[in-house]
Image (tube, grey):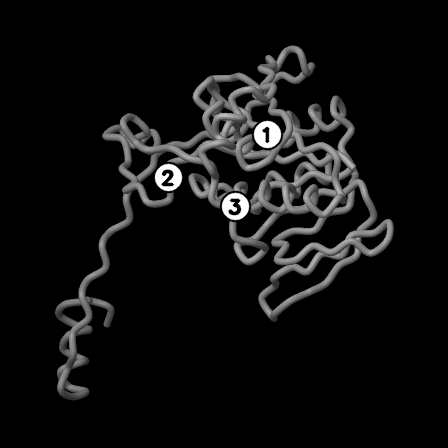
Amino acid sequence: MKILIAIKRVPDSKTSIRVKADGSGIETANVKMSMNPFDEIAVEEAVRLKEKGLAQELVVVSIGSPASQEVLRTALAMGADRALLLATEAEIQPFNAARLLAAVVQREAPHLVLLGKQAIDTDNNQVGQMLAGLLNWPQGTFASELRFEGEALQVTREIDGGLETLQVKLPAVITTDLRLNEPRYISLPNIVQAKRKPLEVLSLESLGVSLLPGLEVVKLVVPEKKRKAVRVENAAELVRCLKEEAKVI
C-alpha cells in the first residue's frame, strides 16, 4: 500500500501572530515556521502504519515556495520515503490546493491520502473534503483512530455528540485530529538520513493545473480585546453598568 501525505508550512504554533500594517495578511518575516501540527499527526500515523507492515511507501507532498522543503525534510526524518514539492509563490486557496493534490494523486496512484483536518494559519478545514469530492473517493474526517479490518478501513471520528465509527473502502481520503497520536521525537541520525532521501520539485504546469481565481481577502484585522469582568454588589449596580458602561440597555 502506498500512502500520500499532504503537509503545509505554517507559522509555528508557539509564535505570536502579527497582522501586517496594511491589513493584507499576517506578518511572516522573521517568524518561525514549522509543519502544520495536524499534518504532523498525519505523517506520524502513516509511519506507524508502515512500521506495522500495512504500508510499503510513504510519499509526502507540499505546495509552496522553496522554503517548504524544510517541512518536507522534517517529514522524511520522521520516516517518509520521498517528497514532492509543488513549487509556487502564489497564495494557494483551498480549492486550488485540492485540485493540485488531485493531480498528484493521479500521478502517484496512492491507496490512501492522509492530511491534517485543517491548517492553523487559515483554519479553513476544506481541502480534505474537496479532495475527496474531486476524486470521488470515500472520506473520513476528524479521525481519532484508524484500524484496518480486512480490505476496509475503520475510522473513529470525533463529532459534537461523541465518537462515530465509519467503515470506508480504499482508496480513501482521511483527515487527522489531535487525539489520533502524538508525533515522535526526531533523532539526529534520522535528520542526517533525511538529507539523502529524494525530494522532487514539480512545477504546476507539469501537473497540467492552472490556478483558478477564488476568494479575495479584503482586510485582516486584530479582534478587539475583551473588557475585564467586574463584580457587582446587587441588581441595581448591574443595571447601571449595563446602561452606562456597556450601553446595551
> Residue 2 sits in which quadrant?
top right
Under mark 3, the amino acid is Phe
Q: Nearer the viewer, mark 2 or mark 1?
A: 2
Residue placed farthest to the bottom in the image?
Answer: 234
Under mark 1, the amino acid is Ala
Q: Is residue 201 visible?
A: yes
Residue 97: numbered disc: 1
Under mark 2, the amino acid is Asp
In the picture, measured across the screen, residue 32 lies left or right of residue 162, that is left
Q: Residues within 10 Å of mark 2 (few under 14, many from 20)?
A: some
Between 223 and 166, the residue placed more toward the observer is 166
Residue placed farthest to the front in the image?
Answer: 189
Q: Residue at x 18, y 65 (%)?
A: 228
**Residue 87 sits above or below residue 54 on the image:** above
Q: Residues within 10 Å of mark 1 (few under 14, many from 20)?
A: many
In the picture, measured across the screen, residue 10 lies left or right of residue 144, that is left
CA distance separating discs 2 and 3: 12 Å
User: At which x and y percent is residue 166?
Assistant: 75, 59
In the picture, measured across the screen, residue 71 lies left or right of residue 249, that is right
Residue 12: numbered disc: 2
User: At which x and y percent is residue 202?
Assistant: 61, 14
Residue ID for mark 3:
38
User: Is disc 3 in contact with disc 1, using a CB cutoff of under 8 Å?
Assistant: no
